[in-house]
Image (cartoon, coloured by chain):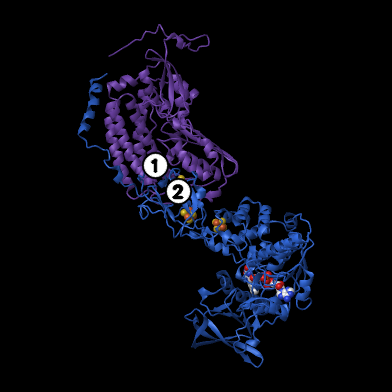
Chain colours: A purple, B blue
Amino acid sequence: MFSFKPDRSQYPEPGPDGKLEIDLETGKYLKLWHGPNHPGITGNMSVELTVCGDEVVDGKTHVGYLHRGFEKLMERRTFIQVFPIVCRVCVPEPDFNEYCYAAAVEELADIDVPEMANWIRTLILEMGRFNSYMMAMGGISGALGLGVVGQWMTYTRDLMLDRFEELTGARIYHMFILPGGVRAHLPEGFEARMEEVLQTAEKYLADAEKLMFHSSVFKTRTKGVGYIDPALFERYGVTGPNARAGGVAKDVRKDSPYLVYDQLEFTVHTETESDIYARTLVRYKDLQETIQLIRQILRKMPKTGEVMSNLPNVLHWKIPRGETYIKGESSRGEYGYYLVTDGTGYPRRINVRGPSYTHAMALLEHLIPGTNISDVAALMVSLHTYPPEIER
Amino acid sequence: MSLRDVLSPFTAWKHVIDTPVTIQDPFNREAADRYRGFHQNDMDKCIGCGSCEEICQNDAIDMVPVEGQNAGPGDSGLRPMIDYGRCCWCALCVDVCMTGSLTMSNEYTWVDSDPDAFRFIPGVDGKSWDLEPKGYQREDTRRLTGTTRAPMGEMEPEARIGNFDEIVDGFTREQAVIEADRCVECGLCVATCPAHMDIPDYISKVRDGDYEGGLQILYETNPFSQACGRICTHKCETTCAAMHEGDAIAIRWLKRDITDNVPRERYFDLIQKPDVPETGQKIAVIGAGPAGLTTAYDLARKGHKVVVFEALDKPGGMMRYGIPEYRLPYDVLDHEISVIESMGVEIRCNMRVGHEISMQQLEKAYDAVVLSIGLHQGRSTRVPGSEKAEAAIDLLRRITAGEEVPVPEQVAVIGGGNVAMDIARSMARLQKVKYDKVGVTITALEELDRFLADAEEIKEAQEEGCVIYPARGPQEITLEGENVTGLRTWKVKAIFDDEGRFAPKYDEADEMVHPAQMVVEAIGQMSDISLLGAELTEKLEWNRGRIMIDADGQTSEAWLWAAGDVTSGPDVIHAVADGHRVARSVGKMLATKREKLQ
Ligand SMILES: Cc1cc2nc3c(=O)[nH]c(=O)nc-3n(C[C@H](O)[C@H](O)[C@H](O)COP(=O)(O)OP(=O)(O)OC[C@H]3O[C@@H](n4cnc5c(N)ncnc54)[C@H](O)[C@@H]3O)c2cc1C
Ligand code: SF4
Ligand code: SF4
Ligand code: SF4
């Protein structure tokens, strides 16, 4: 309908080294700080844009606004004391940290986890994925000016937080997956209350679908925008929905099943266009899959059983020398914990592999040049990144 | 682009008529039942062990003294104060709490203009949620510290009854690690231990497998660690933090584990006499029991010359001549004493003070004299025929000394304490060897659950064939001519009168005669103070038949101290503690004396 061709005659030329020669003195360019306090930025990071007209010619990602040095902090904590910290590495989907850390410790300390706990852990992770996708859906709509979807998603996420609250005792930082199992059984009547939430979610999602995937505005602003060449996936470590939207059916839950995923049926959805639209659609479908998975888990899980195995006295728990990498499929792609132990009561090294690290820094920088200023927010949100996991 | 794509977004308008989903009044929204809100602490249950403080990774907890909560056995008197500026509501403190006293309410809204209000002592500083039953509690089966004691191997009754071999195996490495792991290092037991042994520290050495380091810690406070690792009355275990929601830590067995795991010859390298100059001052210690030998050990390590005078053939006191070999093997005791001797302590056996040498001689020849003669005279019931009874400690001494003791087919023991069990079980062993059967009857005034003996001792005695008649008072030792034929008892109705004085009442209709060719009295011991002589006895101050001492163990005579059973008791570890106390006091006096001479 509308088409606008900017005059590119004034644009910078790449120099002999292939890099753009941007001379701010010419007055052609403007530096624009996108973030850290900007609604179009996910979390506390910023992108330093160089714009020429309304087109972005260069972007530099800046992190460090949030740095709390988690990994270093963990080296100064006993193994049990690390437990309350890890969730804070990722606010919207904290449970992955709890799971990966617990599983890493369990592997190195040779601790068995009761079956029941594995089911509850899987349930928690899917509930977390639900919330994270809700935020992503709301976020992308918000970034494109579709505030109402953001509100619906926030509301449904809040309902899920109620379930988190009754199951884990907290809404955001659940601190529920202890090494050795989980803290408690499902509360009485939990399944029915969860079903209500899922039905409400489905209702709003059906509406959201109309507003997003069947909206001319949304389509215009997302289709063909923010294209990631699948050839770059390997180089930039692209995983999760970002890769699946480019036709790569990668999902750790399927590729190397953990917890009880081998006992669950679910589809790994892919698209081929690798643009904002495709990425959002993959998330939307995966969210439906998550709703289905939560139902499936509640149906299939055992009704009784221990949720926690015996731990050694955690106050002076030493773990033999070893190292391991535990990974899982978070809503944003492969999430992993690399844990090194040296036989003392403290982790020697913990490294958190958050997908945002690759997606929000290097990849975003690569994708930005050539976009329109108004697309930067959508592009960034479409990568679904959470800065805290960059600055672990 | 289809028309549908233009129109469908307008479907959102249907929500215009929805009721708002926002909660109007979040202050009255109740949190979930398990919500981790502000803490509650049950002051009656909390023991101030500080495990909550230890686990908190935010340093949000400080253990602070609280008015009305006094330190006492098994309670530090401290209580956790929580700083909600630091707390992250992880509830690890609740999970680790050793008594289950600490819980969380589901209260999450609280407004106060004073920031300091958010640092308070739950359970002390009253809050509206103190009695709120809802809120986070750990699931019943979940503990962050072990609750079950590692099993200890023991000889089966059939195997042990025919000999005096040691019954208890000692921990395997695996068992020791499990047991040592359970300790939360709160130190409550240290306060209870009369010698204030550094229990959590040596337990941590067991965990780390550093037995030599552990041994050095043991010897800092107890030169009878090997003996105590076997026969200590382990009062420490009655105040252990772990006992509230599980078994107390087997502190005694862990101590033994250390001493068993250091090769004997290594003791002499690990526990060496400190490099101190000789003072030239001399101390005489009377009695080579744990009290006397501990005093000697401490003083010798300070460079003094110590001579121990012992009436009997071998040193060790009641540890050798009272406690049977199946509980404390002689070679363990011999080795223990040889470590003490390696400090330069001279032990002169078969030197009964009052016979071979007099108190006056000692007073003259030594700078200080320590009286630690224990209680070596049995008390008698004085019932008719009791002149024919045997005293338990005499018999035990003779058994140890290898003397011939009469072993009749039937023995009746009067007394319900540990000494009674020791003699009953010793006689049972001798009977088993001689007759291949056991015929021992134990009678005591108390009901079985009030016996003074340890529950283990009672159980093991019964396993070995001793028959216990509780609540029976001795009336007569029946005789036929010179020979004992039995023990006549009445049923006890009450032991004490209304004022709590000892005045047993009997049901005379309920009479029994326990046939026996030997009756043993095991109802208590007293000191043989004849060694003091009339003059000194007269000079000393007394308190109800016991020599009066000051807080440092010094008698009213400037040169004489007293320690151990002779003044207080009742067990080896108290004797050790007493020995240290007296050694400190004597050392101080000697130092003053040296200074004056210079
Ligand atoms: C049968 C029995 C079982 C016991 N079981 C335990 C137990 O399991 N655990 C525990 O902790 N405690 C036990 N005790 C108590 C413990 O043995 C004593 O509390 C402890 O030995 C007291 O130490 P002591 O040094 O004061 O006296 P003792 O150990 O009695 O030593 C006193 C020494 O002084 C000597 N002596 C006395 N008079 C003279 C003199 N005139 N001249 C020279 N030497 C003299 C004695 O021969 C003796 O060697 C038991 C006691 C008995 C009797
Ligand atoms: S752990 Fe429990 S019992 Fe120990 S001090 Fe803390 S609240 Fe009290
Ligand atoms: S809840 Fe966690 S952070 Fe708060 S006081 Fe307890 S252990 Fe510390
Ligand atoms: S033995 Fe018991 S009382 Fe002593 S430090 Fe360990 S847990 Fe605390």
**A263 or B596, nearer to the observer:** B596
Quarter where residue B386 is shown: bottom right
Q: Residue under mark 1: which chain is it in?
A: A
* Position above or below: B425 against A233: below
- The amino acid at mark 1 is Leu
Q: Give the percent coordinates (x, y) of residue A300.
A: 37, 45
Measure the C-alpha gap from mark 2 to mark 1.
Answer: 33 Å
Q: Give the percent coordinates (x, y) of residue A101.
A: 49, 40
- In this orientation, does residue A390 appear? yes
The residue carrying pointer 2 sits among few (fewer than 14), some (14 to 19) or many (20 or more) residues within 10 Å by Cα, namely many
Label 1 beta carbon within 8 A of ligand 3: no
Residue at x-position 55% and y-position 39%: A75
> In the displayed image of the protein, which residue is found farthest to the top?
A9
**Residue located beneath label 1 in the image:** A123
Which of the two discs, 2 and 1, sits closer to the camera? 2
Q: Horizontally, is B121 left or right of B331 in the view?
A: left
- The amino acid at mark 2 is Ile
Q: Which mark is on residue B82? A: 2
Q: Residue under mark 2: which chain is it in?
A: B
* Position above or below: B367 against B498: above
- In this orientation, does residue B167 appear? no
Q: Give the percent coordinates (x, y) of residue B285.
A: 73, 69
* Position above or below: A11 against B199: above
* Position above or below: A283 against A374: below
The residue carrying pointer 1 sits among few (fewer than 14), some (14 to 19) or many (20 or more) residues within 10 Å by Cα, namely many
Label 2 beta carbon within 8 A of ligand 3: yes
Residue at x-position 50% and y-position 84%: B505
Q: Horizontally, is B13 left or right of A114 in the view?
A: left
User: Image quadrant for the N terminus of chain A?
Assistant: top left
